[in-house]
Image: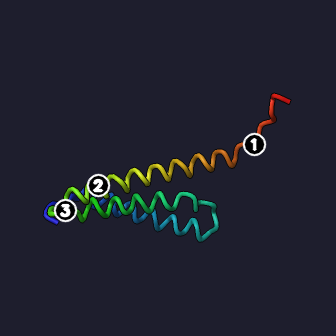
Amino acid sequence: MSDFDLFVFNSMIIGLIAIFFLILIVYKRIDFRNYVPGLICFVIFFFIEVFEVEIYEEFFDLLENASFLLGTSLLLTAVLFEYYKSKPKRNNMDN
């Protein structure tokens, strides 16, 4: 932990606060469960960014990029799933 980036550490704290509020949303039974895996990937991304070790820098960079890519794709999938679930079905024009 030779490089300690204060900006990334503050971002991680903000992410943890967002996860805390996410737990409250799930507790109050608001349907937000589709977004949890993507947000967990972002928290993992922030942890890897803050506690990166200089010895295994390439490995941690790979994990960091993979968790960011997985988190964004999971959130995009959740948003598209929510969109298509709420969209009314169209009648087939070919009939």
Confirm or deny contact between disc 2 and disc 3 (CB under 8 A).
no
Name which of mark 2 and mark 3 comes first in the sequence: 3
Rate crowding at label 1 as few (under 14), some (14 to 19) or many (20 or more) other CA atoms within 10 Å.
few
Give the camera-side residue of 59 and 40.
59
Name which of mark 3 and mark 1 comes first in the sequence: 3
Residue drawn at (34%, 59%), measured in percent from left and top? Answer: 45
Instruction: Give the CA separation, mark 2 to mark 3.
Output: 10 Å
User: Which residue bears the numbered disc 2?
Assistant: 62
Q: Secondary structure at mark 1?
A: loop
Rate crowding at label 3 as few (under 14), some (14 to 19) or many (20 or more) other CA atoms within 10 Å.
few
Confirm or deny contact between disc 2 and disc 1 (CB under 8 A).
no
Residue drawn at (21%, 56%), measured in percent from left and top? Answer: 58
Residue drawn at (23%, 59%), measured in percent from left and top? Answer: 6
User: Which residue bears the numbered disc 3?
Assistant: 56
Instruction: Give the CA separation, mark 2 to mark 1.
Output: 41 Å
Give the camera-side residue of 78 and 93.
93
The x, y position of residue 24, in whole percent, is 54, 69
The x, y position of residue 92, in whole percent, is 80, 33
Instruction: Give the CA separation, mark 3 to mark 1.
Output: 50 Å
Query: Would residue 37 appear left or right of 95 to someone viewing this image?
Result: left
Quarter where residue 63 is shown: bottom left
Q: Secondary structure at mark 3?
A: loop
